[in-house]
Image (cartoon, rainbow, N blue to C red):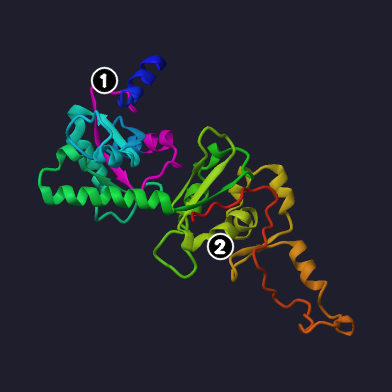
């Protein structure tokens, strides 16, 4: 199989394994605003559950023409833009489209896992030239989103398989709790675009967000333990490693600044307070218990560095 795959690729062909178990399958469409950081297996299971259909999800190039491509022309360049494609049985195609439209149509406002996406039909189902122009615009939007998103990772979670485990008292998973958070000054939007496990990793969790929200997102990722502890989500603390819990045991979540204040931060501020007799600088002496402003302090012991495009 590998030899056949390499041979086809050398001749400008692509070989994509089927994402579902359907014997005769086809693409129902692709998800605009999807990203490579999303877990295909999790989303396949999620969409299969909410629709009651046998669905598969695969990250692959968006087909921009209806003909066979054998040369590296402009159309081939467009096809390199990738997205998550939803695969279903041929004889269930229309039913699957109708069911997915409840969640991913142009009018949808609620999304199964919190990530806003839209189901775009395949190019073969688009007939008018005007709509084909809009199809090209969708491809451009998909490419721009994936190039523009910022991201960061955390290594504090003991296993990312627990992200979807629900708190029996609230019926909310750790994933849902975080995806419900809005930026401080942007109600009605999401702080995170996606939260999912890192590809081929059991402990790394990847967060994606708009670069404008990078500061707030990174502060929250760095202070996940005190955030959960001080906002009533104690159940999800079992998701974290003992080292992470111990490191931030005395940290407090600051609702006003929306970041964690650690014991170290407080002590550092107090070191400069009430010693006016020894202050030879031009800066006024701080007072104890006064709320201090911090720059980019990160109380987290073991999280990844943020990645911001540009």
Question: Residue at coordinates 57% horizontally, 34% vertically from top-left?
Answer: 202
Secondary structure type for disc 1? loop
Would you call the spot at circle 2 few (<14 residues within 10 Å), some (14-19), or many (20 or more)?
few
Q: Does residue 207 appear anywhere in the picture?
A: yes
State the extent of the magenta-drawn residues as a range.
18-46
Question: Residue at coordinates 49% horizontally, 54% vertically from top-left?
Answer: 309
Distance between mark 2 and mark 1 Cα atoms: 47 Å
207 sits to left or right of 83 = right
Residue 163 placement (x, y as % from top left): 52, 42
279 vs 48: above or below: below
Which residue is at the front of the view, 218 or 110?
218
296 vs 138: above or below: below
Question: Residue at coordinates 28% horizontally, 32% vertically from top-left?
Answer: 87
How many badges with numbers are in the image?
2
**The N terminus: image quadrant:** top left
Q: Nearer the viewer, mark 2 or mark 1?
A: 2
Secondary structure type for disc 2? helix
Residue 44 in which image quadrant? top left
Question: Residue at coordinates 64% horizontally, 48% vertically from top-left?
Answer: 303
276 vs 299: above or below: below
Of labels 2 and 1, earlier in sequence is 1
Q: Name the residue under label 1.
A: 23
Q: Mark 2 points at which residue?
A: 215
Which residue is at the front of the view, 176 or 77?
77
């Amino acid at each position: 199989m590998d030899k056949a795959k390499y041979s086809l690729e050398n001749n400008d062909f692509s070989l994509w394994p089927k994402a579902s178990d359907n014997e005769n399958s086809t693409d129902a469409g692709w998800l605009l605003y999807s990203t490579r950081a999303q877990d295909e297996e999790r989303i396949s299971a999620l969409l299969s559950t909410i629709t009651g259909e046998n669905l598969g999800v695969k990250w692959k190039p968006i087909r921009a023409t209806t003909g066979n491509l054998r040369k590296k022309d402009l159309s081939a360049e467009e096809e390199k833009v990738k997205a998550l494609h939803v695969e279903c049985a041929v004889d269930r195609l229309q039913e699957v489209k109708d069911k997915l439209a409840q969640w991913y149509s142009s009018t949808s406002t609620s999304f199964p896992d919190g990530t806003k996406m839209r189901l775009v039909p395949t190019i073969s189902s688009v007939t008018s030239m005007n709509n084909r122009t809009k199809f090209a615009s969708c491809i451009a939007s998909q490419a721009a989103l994936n190039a523009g998103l910022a991201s960061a990772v955390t290594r504090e979670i003991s296993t990312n398989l627990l992200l979807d485990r629900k708190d029996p008292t609230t019926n909310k998973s750790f994933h849902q709790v975080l995806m419900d958070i809005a930026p401080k000054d942007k109600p009605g939007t999401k702080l995170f675009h996606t939260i999912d496990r890192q590809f081929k990793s059991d402990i790394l969790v990847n967060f994606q967000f708009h670069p404008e929200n990078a500061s707030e997102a990174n502060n929250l990722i760095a202070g996940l333990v005190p955030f959960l502890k001080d906002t009533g989500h104690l159940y999800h603390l079992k998701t974290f490693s003992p080292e992470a819990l111990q490191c931030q045991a005395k940290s407090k979540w600051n609702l006003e600044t929306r970041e964690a204040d650690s014991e170290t931060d407080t002590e550092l501020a107090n070191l400069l307070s009430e010693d006016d007799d020894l202050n030879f600088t031009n800066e006024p002496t701080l007072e104890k218990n006064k709320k201090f402003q911090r720059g980019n302090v990160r109380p987290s012991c073991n999280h990844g560095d943020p990645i911001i495009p540009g």
